[in-house]
Image: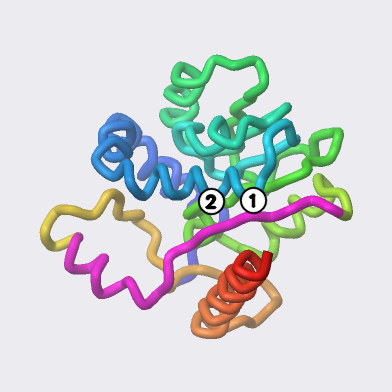
């Protein structure tokens, strides 16, 4: 059975609302991963840019890139409340609601961050179309996502009670709109994008 967009967003928001009280503690326990992400994103996004983050959680990554203007959009009202308390800078704005329903801001952003969020989107193609009007020709989209090859390890972690979050809506329910991209091809595309990006970085 396919889940519709409103149900997907409602269940996803509820899952992250439940996780919000533990988020800061989990980040401290996994500071190596958090710090490495921050280093990579700071390398790709220079300070002083206009940055949008989709699914910002507590806002740490958005703050880490030191934007001139940073805007975060997230489904979870609990995460939003904590992000606002954690980062009170006037340069950062945290908005609540589905990315599919947010009005395009002006001016356009120099960079868009999507960190560990692609796997939670209802329709990836639709979201990319949504953020396109917010970009200019030199806007940089930076994303990271885990490979499906990690799923056996995640299932083991879940059985041991070590998994950070178990979303109630499963990957198999995802729709890809009219693109007809199979899950395997989608995963291969993401891995190819990452490989190309790493090759370009090594050549610098």
Q: Do the residues labelled 1 and 2 touch (CB within 8 Å)?
A: yes
Instruction: Answer with left or right where residue 156 lies relative to residue 75.
Output: left
Query: Where 159 sits versus 104, above or below?
Result: below
Quarter of the image with the N terminus in it: bottom left
The color scheme shown is rainbow
Q: Residue at x 63, y 55 (%)?
A: 142
Q: Position of residue 51 (x, y in %)?
A: 69, 38
Q: What stretch is highlighted in magenta?
A: 138-157
Label annotation for residue 170: none
Q: Does the magenta stretch include residue 144?
A: yes
Mark 1 sits on what residue? Answer: 44
Residue 150 is situated, as x and y percent measured from the top left of the image, at 33, 72
Q: Which of 138 and 115 is in front in this view?
A: 138
**Residue sitting farthest toward the front:** 204
What residue is drawn where x is 17% and y is 68%? 156
Q: Would you say residue 5 sits in the magenta stretch?
A: no
Quadrant housing the C terminus: bottom right
Q: Where is residue 174 in the image (x, y as percent from the top left)?
A: 51, 68
**To which quarter of the image does residue 90 belong?**
top right
User: Mark on residue 40?
Assistant: 2
Asked whether, in this view, residue 56 is left or right of residue 178, the answer is left
Residue at position x 57%, y 75% in the image: 195
Q: Disc 1 on helix, strand or loop?
A: helix
- Name the one closer to the observer, 20 or 10: 20
The residue at the point 48 percent across, 57 percent down is 120
Mark 2 burial class by Cα count in 10 Å: few <14, some 14-19, many 20+ = few
Mark 1 burial class by Cα count in 10 Å: few <14, some 14-19, many 20+: some
Q: Is residue 187 above or below residue 25?
A: below
- Compared across the picture, whether 82 is left or right of 124 comes to left
């Amino acid at each position: 059975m396919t889940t519709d967009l409103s149900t997907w967003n409602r269940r996803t928001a509820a899952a992250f609302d439940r996780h919000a009280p533990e988020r800061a503690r989990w980040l401290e326990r996994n500071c190596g991963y958090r710090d490495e992400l921050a280093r990579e994103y700071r390398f790709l996004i220079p300070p002083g840019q206009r940055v949008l983050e989709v699914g910002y959680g507590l806002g740490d990554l958005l703050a880490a890139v030191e934007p001139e203007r940073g805007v975060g959009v997230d489904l979870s009202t609990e995460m939003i409340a904590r992000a606002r308390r954690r980062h009170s800078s006037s340069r950062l704005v945290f908005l609540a609601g589905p990315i599919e329903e947010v009005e395009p801001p002006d001016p356009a952003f120099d960079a868009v961050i999507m960190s560990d969020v692609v796997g939670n989107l209802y329709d990836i193609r639709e979201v990319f179309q949504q953020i396109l009007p917010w970009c200019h020709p030199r806007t940089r989209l930076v994303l990271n996502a885990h490979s499906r090859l990690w799923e056996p390890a995640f299932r083991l972690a879940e059985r041991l009670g070590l998994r950070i979050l178990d979303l109630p809506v499963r990957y198999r329910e995802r729709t890809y709109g009219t693109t007809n991209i199979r899950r395997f091809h989608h995963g291969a595309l993401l891995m190819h994008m990452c490989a190309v990006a790493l090759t370009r970085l090594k050549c610098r």
